[in-house]
Amino acid sequence: MYEAVRSDRNLYSKNLIEAQDEVSELKRKFGIASLQINQLKDEIESKDTALTSSQHELGVARKESDKNKDEMNAEKTKNESLNAIVQNLKSELTRNTLIIRELNNDYEIKKKEIAKVINQRDVLGTQLIRRNDELALLYEKIKILQTNMSKGETEYH
């Protein structure tokens, strides 16, 4: 019985040592696993922080992109309206150019008409002067004839 108890004790002692070794091995593995868990938690936390900052930067970039798109659309509409204004001004310029050409042609025609009228006036002026000279001569002839007539009448009486 003593032998049996001793062999049991040796067996249990051996089992205890193995169990203690297992416990220490499990504690060591637990420590390693716990360190790995902490490292993974830190890594997850840093990646989560990086993801959050990336999402924030992405949101800011999207807002800026939307703002730039809005500005671009506003500039496009402004550019289109300015192009429409330029087209209107070009068409108005062509109309005004045509009007100016027509007015220049009318001016040249009027200028020629005025030159003709001035020539006619000058011709008429010279004709008037000749007629006046002729009238003056005729009046002098009439005076001479009247004086001759009055002399003739006085001699006749």
Image (tube, grey):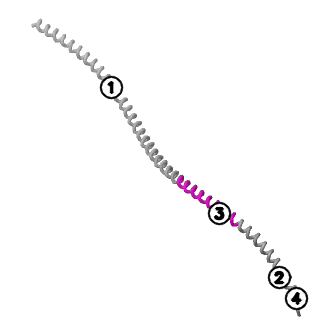
Which sits in the foreground, 39 or 107?
A: 107
Q: Amino acid at mark 2?
A: Ile
Q: According to the image, label 4 marks what residue?
A: 152
Q: Amino acid at mark 3?
A: Lys
Q: According to the image, label 3 marks what residue?
A: 110
Q: Residue at x 88, y 88 (%)?
A: 152
In the image, farthest residue toward the front? 156
Q: According to the image, label 1 marks what residue?
A: 40
Q: Which residues are magenta?
A: 89-117
* Mark pair 3, 1: CA separation: 101 Å
Q: Is residue 39 magenta?
A: no
Q: Residue at x 34, y 24 (%)?
A: 39
Residue 3 location, quadrant: top left
Mainly helix, strand or loop, the magenta region?
helix
Q: N-terminal of the two: label 3 or label 2? A: 3
Are there few (<14), some (14-19), or many (20+) residues within 10 Å of tag 1? few
